[in-house]
Amino acid sequence: MYVLNTLGRFVANFIKYKDLLFELVKKDIQLKYRNSVLGVLWSMLNPLLMTIVISIVFMTLFKSDIAYFPAYVMAGRIIYQFFAESTDFALASIQANSSLIRKIYVPKYFFPLSRICSSFVTTLIALVPFVLLMVVMGVPFQWTSLLFFIPLFYLFGISVGVGLLLSSIYVFFKDTKYLYSVFLTIIMYLSPIFYPASIIPEKFLLFIQFNPLFIIMEMFRDMVLYGSLPSALDHLVSILYMIVFGAVGLMVFYKSQDRFIYYL
């Protein structure tokens, strides 16, 4: 009963302030592209340019034989870029809005959530050049491509949990930002962005699969590029990651949010 009452209050509070969340998302997008000539167009050019560079290097120097390799790389880049950008953006969200938090009541979780949502919007924009690249490369359309939102939904849930966790820790421990940048670099190399999972030695594969981006990248590519459906186990593991990261992030955030004001 207590859980249901708490959930009911949470939903009612969210509905009451939903317009504020929308404004925060809009503000975050405007802030991201402030003083930028290309603006939102950069969200489409960035993954495309990185894909071109990586594809040239690996297709000429390393002779990659992955089917539709440029699209393979771009799919991995989009997944990684969303996770890295959204969680890093959310990390300092409480600190960045300290003046507002000190003046009026605002649901504090809105600040990291708005930054995750704004990054998700720019990620959806980045899918436009990805689709164009698929057309140019002659990737056959598969009905499974219409399910692309499923792995993105899993990734969004995981990112929200990680963002809440990081934003609450950063208030008390400012070195979190530097440590997390190192962590993101490690995650990038542990994710099959520009190499196939098949080259990973069996003894390391199980360890690398603990990286939540690994399974989501494979799921996204299988659906969009290769027309195959992920196994039920893949869905269960992804849902488990969402629940674990979400629960931990929410618990740490709610346990510590009352003390934020003393460190802002």
Image: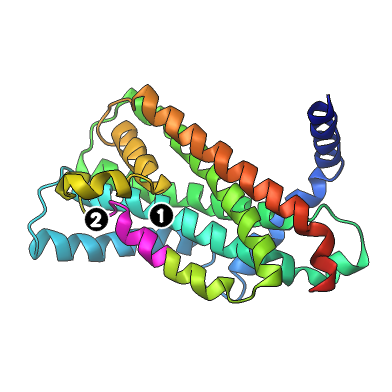
Q: Which part of the image, by quadrant, shows the N terminus?
A: top right
Q: Is residue 185 magenta?
A: yes
101 left or right, relative to 50: right
In the rendering, at what x and y percent does residue 201 appear? 16, 49
Q: Tags 2 and 1 in contact by the CB under 8 Å rule?
A: no
Type of the residue with mark 1:
Tyr
Drawn side of residue 63 relative to residue 81, left or right: left
**Residue 247, image x and y in percent?**
64, 42
Residue hosting label 2: 194
Q: Amino acid at mark 2?
A: Phe
Residue 122 visible in the shown view: yes
Tell me the residue that label 1 is attached to.
80
Q: Earlier in the sequence, mark 2 or mark 1?
A: 1
Highlighted range, magenta: 184-194
Query: Alpha-carbon neighbours of circle 2 within 10 Å: few (<14), some, or many (≥20)?
Result: many
Q: CA distance from mark 2 to mark 1?
A: 11 Å
Residue 40 visible, this angle: no
